[in-house]
Amino acid sequence: MTRESIFLLLAAVGLTPIALSYGLVPQASLSFLFDIQVSSINSMHIFRAVMGLYLALVIFWIAGARRDSLTLPALWSLTVFMLGLAAGRTVSIAVDGMPHPLLIVYLLLELGFGFVGYYLAIRYQEK
């Protein structure tokens, strides 16, 4: 198993519980984790859509870990996804202030995974 495959699988495993916490039972998990009240159909719909996006990418990263032809696209999608989340969180911190400490941990993980994904994608292209 290559380091790229291990990295993609690690990201997939790490993102799965986050995805489920956002959308499986959002009214319970988001209230417990972040004191976010999810009570309307529209808010549940949005969080479940986010869960679907996260899980779709998890599936793609697993496929990229298993098929050489998908490894590079999976690495680039992981890089864009993680750094995009980190950029949005950074803007929110600048505009809205400091969020829950767990969300700061998410930011640090997204930056780390994003930059490692970028490094691995560049190195993989050079092979």
Image: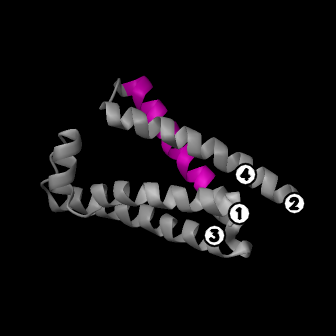
Amino acid of disc 2: Lys
Q: Label 1 vs label 4: CA separation?
A: 11 Å
For disc 1, the marked residue is: 2
Residue at position x 79%, y 58% in the image: 124
Q: Nearer the viewer, mark 1 or mark 4?
A: 1
Dot 3: what SS? Answer: helix
Residue segment shown in magenta: 78-95
Left or right of 2? Residue 38 is left
Q: Residue at x 49, y 45 (%)?
A: 85
Dot 1 or dot 4: first in sequence order is 1
Is 94 one of the magenta-colored residues? yes
Q: Earlier in the sequence, mark 1 or mark 3?
A: 1
Q: Could you tell me which secondary element the residue under label 2 belongs to?
A: loop
Task: Identify which residue is drawn at 55% across, 62% down.
Answer: 9
Say which label, 4 or 3, has the lower sequence index.
3
Q: If the image is split into quadrants, where does the N terminus sit?
A: bottom right
Residue 103, given in percent of the width and then of the height, sits at 36, 37
Residue 75 position, x and y percent, is 66, 58
Name the amino acid, label 1.
Thr
Per the image, the residue denoted by label 4 is 120
Residue topped by disc 3: 64
Question: How many neighbours does mark 3 have within 10 angstroms: few (below 14), some (14-19), or many (20 or more)?
Answer: many
